[in-house]
Amino acid sequence: MMPLDGNSTQRTLTDVTAAIRTVLDQPDLDLTLASSLEDIPNWDSMDLIAVVVELECRYDILFELPQIDSFARVGDMVRAVAAKCHLRAA
Amino acid sequence: MLFNSYLFLGGFLPVALCGFAVACRLGRRAALLWMIAVSGVFYAWWAPGFLPLLLASVAGNYAVAMAIGSSADRPVRQAWLLSGAIAADIAVLVGCKALAPVQPPGLSFFTFTQIACLLDWQAQGHPRRGLLEYGVLVGFFPHVIAGPIPLGREILPQLHDPATLRLSAHNLAIGGGIFVIGLLKKTLLAEPLGDIVARGFTAPETLTLLPAWQAALAWSLQLYFDFSGYSDMAIGLGRMFNLHYPVNFASPYKAQSIIDFWQRWHMTLTRFLMHRLYAPLTVLVLRWRRSRGWKVDRKAQQTIGGFTAMLAMPLLATMLLAGIWHGSGWTFLLFGMLHGVFLAINHAWRLFRTGRRSTAIPAVIGRVGLTYLCVLLGAVLFRSPSVAAAASLLGGMAGLHGVVLDAPTAHALFHAELAAAWLAGLFAIVWFAPNTQQIIETSWRPTLPWALAFGCGATLGLLSLGGTGEFLYFQF
């Protein structure tokens, strides 16, 4: 996984948080890189797919399914988005 | 060669274990080769004519996996290789299901294992394991015929661990204990029900209310203990060779919803279907909706159109395919459709309900009972030779063939107190006893009383051998 600078990590975290808030309709949800997806109230596997599709749409990227399965924490999503964006830019 | 046969228990297994102990002393490669050799003998005993198919499938998929691994910088080539291999795997599976008069044993299971492996390796990188390790992952004899369906990341790291390739008294004891529990479930609990079930499902039109219920309940219990017993035996055998398989069966009749049921019944198959069929379908639907500017969030899922497109249709499609996988008749199609509808209703309930789920005992009993009745309905379809026969049995259960206990039918099965007490005892085990994992994890200790208990259990299991033998899931 590529290293990230602090600013871009924060920006991506903000976007991932926004996508999760939108999907779950929980505008006050507060998340960090270490937040476990399973610990988010009422979270289920359908929400994971919906959040990923929101992020794909926002960043114009595509994730493979096994990668989606591997997302356990918010930080996993943030790093995966950053890596996909980095690959596309390269 | 069944796990519950004298040949397996008195000949194959002791030789396989002794050979493994010797091979481990000769080195890692020898141990892996031995595991593959005994698996080849085991499989050939079932169907020598299909051994080349298993070997070709393993070799072909491994070659593609290696090619995918060496094409990390060429994603288009990777995608073509992956698509081609999966298409070939599915073509062989569908071709055999549709055309072959005799099904290759375990074809679905070793095909699913390899498809999952290819997809994982393409997405997450090839773990650079050798053909011998891959061969054990796919074809090791405890799981090759009817699962569990392990993932590469669950088994391959174990095979890389030097501690795995060394006979362990601890794992032999635990694995032996798990195996004995499975053997007892199969021989003492599942097989005695076979006669009642066969007679009931052969002539359902003759069954009045209670015999019809008896036949259906007995079938649900036979299937439960047969598959639970098989899963225990497979997992126990793996453990004797130091391999930890994923749990495959976790008290499914204690489930409080149909979603919960499928997370407890044939868990590794459910995992495969959910991750490799349902999830891709859902992702496709959500991407399609998003590309048209439509929302995919919870609010959108709570509309009729959104729920139908994003949840109900992928579920129905997945369960229909799962039904057809079990067999080509209308009963299997309806079985799949029924469970798809049940799951869709369950998801709708979760999505639209307000308030928290009650934990009061009557509410729990109600949920478990309702879930079991839904499963029973599907099980009747699953076992019946035709839809008409299933409808007839369900009609009998509804009292349409009469409710008189002493109906003048030669096929009346209900032998009052004895049969009722037997079924009640089995339900008590199903609903109140700890399952095998719980027994081993929380109660079992390497002590003399446990050794005696498992020794007596093994003796009882051996003395009870000689029923119909074959496991119900082997036909799939």
Image: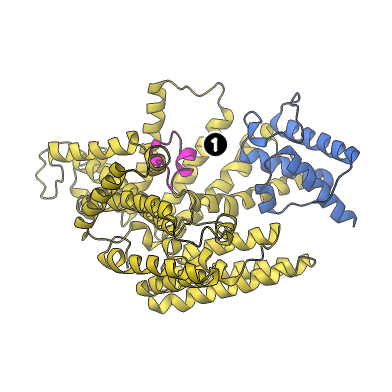
User: Chain B colour?
Assistant: yellow
Give the residue pinned by disc 1: B347
In reply to whether residue B115 is colored magenta, the answer given is no
Image height check: is B10 above or below B302?
A: below
* Chain part drawn in magenta: B249-265
Chain letter, disc 1 residue: B
Q: Is residue B162 left or right of residue A1?
A: left
B224 w.r.t. B79: above or below: above
Secondary element at tag 1:
helix
Whether residue B65 is visible: yes
- Percent x, y of residue B376: 35, 42
> Which of the 4 quarters of the picture holds residue B462?
bottom left
Q: Tell me which amino acid carries mark 1.
A: His
Q: Quadrant of residue B330?
A: bottom left
Left or right: where does residue B39 sit relative to residue B164?
left
Which of the pair B15/B137 is nearer the observer? Answer: B15
- Relative to the observer, which residue lies in front, B110 or B376? B110
Location of residue B356 in the rendering, given as x and y in whole percent from the top left corner: 54, 22
Relative placement, left or right, of B382 versus B277 is: left
Indicate yes or no whether the magenta region holds residue B251.
Answer: yes
Label 1: few (<14), some (14–19) or many (≥20) C-alpha neighbours in 10 Å:
some
- Residue at 17% over, 41% down: B419
